[in-house]
Image (cartoon, grey):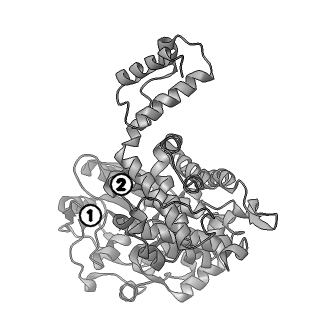
Amino acid sequence: MTSTSAEILKIFNEAYLVGGAVRDAVLKRPVKDLDLAVRGRADFPAKARKLARRLGASVFPLDEERLVYRLTPRSKPGPMIDLAPFQGKDIKEDLFRRDFTVNAMAMPLTAGFKTVPDRKTGLFLPAVKKRALLDPSGGLKDLAAKTVRAVSPQALIEDPLRLLRAFRCASELNFKIDKKTLKLIKSRAAFIARAAPERIHDELLLILNSDESHVWLKALYGAGLLTVIIPELAAQPACAEVYYGKGGVLKHTFAVVERLDHLFENAGDYLPGRHKIEEFLTEKNILRLAALLHDVAKPVRAGMINGRLRFFEHEEYGSLMSSRIMERLRFSRDHIKLISKIVGQHLRPGNLASNDLISDRAMFRFFRAMGEYTVPLLVLSWADHASYITQRQLRSIKDKIKEKPFHIPKGGLPKSGTKKTLRFLEVLNMLFEVYISRNIKLRTVRLIDGHDVIRTLKLKEGPEIGEILEKVSLRQFEGKINTRRQALSYLKSFKKTDTQ
């Protein structure tokens, strides 16, 4: 970045590396982009565009009010740069206006400044000379203490998103939040609703990236932020305490997220053919959000039926509620569709596991109905059922889970306990194995359609066409039909036997 630094200093006489990049350089962590604070607000947009031309980068405003511009390399590899004039009269005043002390340090940019590229992690900044750092609020001290502390109370008042960002920063660094800062966050939790939904969306997903997302979700709840962001969760703690104990449905919800964290951390111990289903597990934060929302409708669907607490249709209603929540938080259509689908169907694998014998036909119908959402649903269901026993019990049955599902005794499965959980996890393991071994993605794609049936058998349109296609698809699932030619040949057998 030597030439880049020189070009920046030609246009802006005074420039500083600031924010997360400086923090990560001190911690010897890789950085993905750079934040620069420069002197001079006059003609700043024009200067930012001029710099972009010289660097061969594209440029666009991130925040026009604060004059924050982003420069992205077009062809040559290089870091993305966020550029802004000092927020205040000088760099010191700028740093005092930042969010947390660990992000409020600056390093003067020199013409000889170089970044060190790394193929896997992005890039590293050169070794930091701590004496050269500007650190007016004690960021180095807080880095050493692994503490996220607000630069000032005003920092959390000026931008309510910082209430949430404190947890994101702490989760990424595995730091704790300073007690005074946490107290201030709790007192102002309601103000997170004033932040733009798009920004809340981004911070929440970054928190859900944590390997211990359940810990941070509990912390968000304790600070009063979680139920402001998702008010639909507010009724969960008082719901079904007789069933789940103190904390009710929310206690169970957090337990499911915890089991999902455990599964992702130990996938090789539990998931057969893990590498073959990896493509479905790339967005772990989205699956964690599904776990958080999977029982969102239980409080509104709770009712006593013959003296027993039930939650009829909570999964279907939860699908609708999840969609509304995610639309409000500006999630993409694909993410909304994924979560609403698996929340709406999250009881289906358990219903399948309640049958003593699970036929090929039943599995085929399940896989075809779920399609691309099969693996995410099985993962959510795994975490849901695994949450009913302790982690120690779960580890004790780790090898038994991989065995063929045991027969359900005449008296049925116990209402709770390790044996019931084992049976359900054995069935889920079987479904994973069948999905992988039979290449379900291909075998649930129909080789022929209704027009082929009508033309070959000379039939009229009607329900009979669907029934025949179902039989052909089942044969395909069983591996008895693999090509379109074989499927058409099989159709002729229906003609010979009057479609029986």
Measure the alpha-carbon separation of dots 1 and 2.
20 Å
Instruction: Give the image quarter of residue 439.
Output: top left
The crowd level at tag 1 (other Cα within 10 Å; few <14, some 14-19, many 20+) is few
Q: Residue furthest front?
A: 410
Name the spot of residue 17 as percent of width and height, x first. 32, 70
Instruction: Give the image quarter of residue 71.
Output: bottom left
Name the spot of residue 375 as percent of width and height, x first. 45, 52
Residue 433 — which label? none
In this rendering, is residue 474 above or below 4?
A: above
Mark 1 residue element? loop
Which residue is more in the foreground, 392 or 316? 392
> Which residue carries the number 1 mark?
121
> Which residue carries the number 2 mark?
278
Which residue is more in the foreground, 419 or 130? 419
Q: Residue at x 21, y 73 (%)?
A: 126
Q: Residue at x 48, y 48 (%)?
A: 374
Q: Give the quadrant of the N terminus.
A: bottom left
* Amino acid carrying mark 1 in the image: Thr
